[in-house]
Amino acid sequence: MSAYDFDLFVIGGGSGGVRCGRISAGHGARVAVAEERFWGGTCVNVGCVPKKIMVHAAEYGQWAGEAPAFGWQAEKGAHDWATLVAARDAEVARLNAIYARLLGNAGVTSFNARATFIDPHTLDVGGQRVTAERIVIAVGGRPQRPEIPGAELGLVSDDLFTLKERPRRIVVVGGGYIALEFASLLRGLGPEVDLLYRQPLPLRGMDGDLREAMAEALGHQGIRLHPGQMPARLEKAGEGLRLITEAGLALETDQVMFATGRVPHTDGLGLERAGIAPGRSGCVPVTLEQATTQPHIFAIGDVTDQLNLTPVATAVGHALADTLFGGNARTASFQNVPTAIFTSPPAATVGLSEEVAAAQGPVDVYVTRFTPMRHTISKAARRTMMKLVVSRRTRRVLGAHMLGEDAAEIMQGIAVAIVAGATKEDFDRTIGIHPTAAEEFVTMRTLTRQVG
Ligand code: NDP
């Protein structure tokens, strides 16, 4: 029996921390997890889960609007924000309880408190001194406002989940996942939405065709796009707000939401007392094995600023638990991680963009754009774009990108093929499911262009 109170102490009860703690306990370790704010972390409480419920709400409105084209005597009517909020919050509360129960059932000791370092093996946990042989930092991230005058007048994504009333007008600042998802779901629920981003297109770093298709889709949804704009200041204007950009654009609105990135939540954690020097924006730098500069301290999830996605944090947390206590040293792969942007319609992607793939070698590119069957009837301006990026040398499909109905659901399966190293010919000999949009991924025969 070690002299420490615990074999493993996990700081942070989000997706990564809970998985790591639970699996470690299953391997026989004496484990504690401390969570100061909410079990399940960002994803369950102020991220993926409540966001997706709001996305579903927006989709019902869209379907109601389109149903008459199919013969239904449906009328879209007004949306009741309070009903949605109550249903969403009840589901989040249910999941919170499940997360806490999962730990209890696994024999993990839970602390409803913030843990901070006293020294490399000792933590202050809500006033109590606790020692651990190994420590995992899994404190996640938090939204960041831009450094402009009046930024405190704006909301961040956390605040969108406590809004008691639906705003009439909102300006969303940013061109990443959170900005696009909220701009789109809010527009779907009724408000007038302006979306302001500093690049010519949203989603910097993603495939160019996907970025173009996204801008087009957001525009079709009735979102007013303001590309190439940097926010300069936010000020009160009567009952509402006025956002002014560096180029002099002035937007009058009720609310402004800043979705200008997230930073690791390491303030006050006492990293220096653990002997760990923080990296960029306060992150905890780690090796591929999730090790910090202290051999017994590890970090997982958004606090490491590697690939900030919930399923990545859980995969990494699980691999670390197996490595430390399961006699099975392994790491989770950061290659070919599929991801989706839950806009209306959604976008999803796996593997390399055309731009990145072409920089590594010659590629064949297949792109198709079409109106899905549903919208040939509904007449909604909701087009689909699908794309494969293929290595001309190996014939392997290096990247798949889609914007259109069900993109996220479709891309999960495509990701399996890409992770398994499927070639274009493997895609070609796969029989399609008809009639679907997904079948286009296995029937793209006409080369759109060759690069390199
Ligand atoms: P991102 O880093 O994806 O996007 C931040 C956006 O804000 C970028 O468009 C960036 O512009 C812009 N920006 C940054 N600073 C400023 C500034 N000072 N003024 C104006 N614009 C600025 O962050 P998000 O907050 O959208 O999301 C955080 C992470 O959470 C994502 O990286 C993603 O991994 C994860 N996430 C995943 C989701 C999913 O899987 N569906 C959903 C939500 C979040 P530029 O591009 O020019 O730098």
Image (spheres, rainbow, N blue to C red):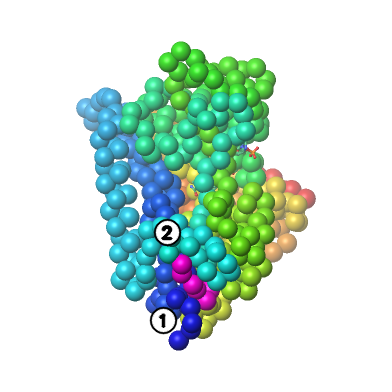
Callout 1: SS = loop
Q: Residues within 10 Å of mark 1 (few under 14, many from 20)?
A: few
Callout 2: SS = loop
State the residue at coordinates (43%, 64%): 128
| Image coordinates for residue 436, horizontal then vertical, percent | 41, 48
Query: What is the residue that sits farthest to the top in this orientation?
Result: 238
Q: Which amino acid does label 2 sit on?
A: Gly
State the residue at coordinates (73%, 51%): 358
Q: Does the magenta stretch include residue 133?
A: yes
**Mark 2: C-beta under 8 Å from nearest atom of ligand 1:** no
What residue is disc 1 on?
28
Q: In this view, does 306 lie to the left or right of 452?
A: left
Q: Does the magenta stretch include residue 89?
A: no
What residue is disc 2 on?
126
Q: Is the magenta stretch mostly helix, strand or loop?
A: strand
Q: Nearer the viewer, residue 48 or 254?
A: 254
Q: Nearer the viewer, residue 315 or 13?
A: 13
Task: Write down the region rendered in magenta.
Answer: 129-135
Task: Relative to 449, say whether 69 is above or below.
Answer: above
State the residue at coordinates (44%, 50%): 42
Cα distance in 3D space between marks 2 and 1: 26 Å
Q: In which quarter of the image is ligand 1?
A: top right
